[in-house]
Image (spheres, helix red, strand yellow):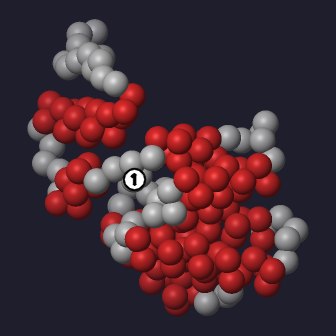
Amino acid sequence: DADNDTHIWSENYDRQLENIFQMQSEVARAIAEQLHLELDLATEERLDKPPTNNLLAYELFLRARATTGSVSGRQRLELLEQAIEEDPDFALAHALLSDMLTNTADVGFPWQSLRERVYAEAYRALELDPLLSEGHMALGAAYIQDRNFPEAERSLKLALSLNPNSASAY
């Protein structure tokens, strides 16, 4: 509480790295409980289902997502491709790969050379997780590249309905 410089809530979490997703869920639920928030069903389901069970795939995904400046776009794509190789069913990695490929089209690579792969990655993400906001965002971005604005709007609105806090979807 900033007004009186006191802690409202704090907790220590000491767990094995193998249980990182379980710990994330515990922390999220504890914070929601302390803030007297009710989690909606979709959020509850997300907390119960880790994005992948492969820690190496998750590490590669996080490195690709978080790396800026010091690593080239090509290297970021390679990290995602490695993550997908480690776990072909890692929907978030497919969605981010689709999105990154779309962004690559914005910086000099011909869209037509990337188009088929962009859609394939977005569709694979949604096949694995139809409620993945990031998958619908990736598909929306692909539709924007194709100047298919009605479909882009539909995909992005669906992404927002699944994750109203997504700045990217806005």
Q: Is residue 77 left or right of residue 90?
A: right
Q: Residue at x 50, y 75 (%)?
A: 124
Between 148 and 66, the residue placed more toward the observer is: 66
Residue drawn where x is 23% and y is 18% of the image: 11
User: What is the x, y in percent for residue 125?
Assistant: 48, 70
**Residue 73, how many percent across, how many down?**
77, 53
Q: Tell me the amino acid under the disc marked 1.
A: Pro
Residue 169: tell me if it is visible: no
Q: Quadrant of residue 117?
A: bottom right
Q: Is residue 68 visible?
A: yes
Q: Return the residue found at the far right.
A: 108
Location of residue 152 (image quadrant): bottom right
Figure check: 129 above or below 152: above
Q: Residue at x 36, y 61 (%)?
A: 163
Vertical order, 7 against 49 (above or below) = above
Residue under pointer 1: 51
Compared across the picture, whether 26 is left or right of 81 comes to: left
Number of callouts:
1
Tell me the crowding category of disc 1: few under 14, some 14 to 19, or many 20 or more residues within 10 angstroms, Cα based: some
SS label for mark 1:
loop
Left or right: 24 in relation to 133: left
Say left or right for 107 vs 135: right
**Residue 63: % across, % down:** 62, 41
Q: Position of residue 165 (x, y in %)?
A: 38, 55
Report the residue that reaches farthest toward the front. Answer: 86
| Residue pictured at 79% horizontal, 84% vertical | 112
Quarter holding the N terminus? Answer: top left
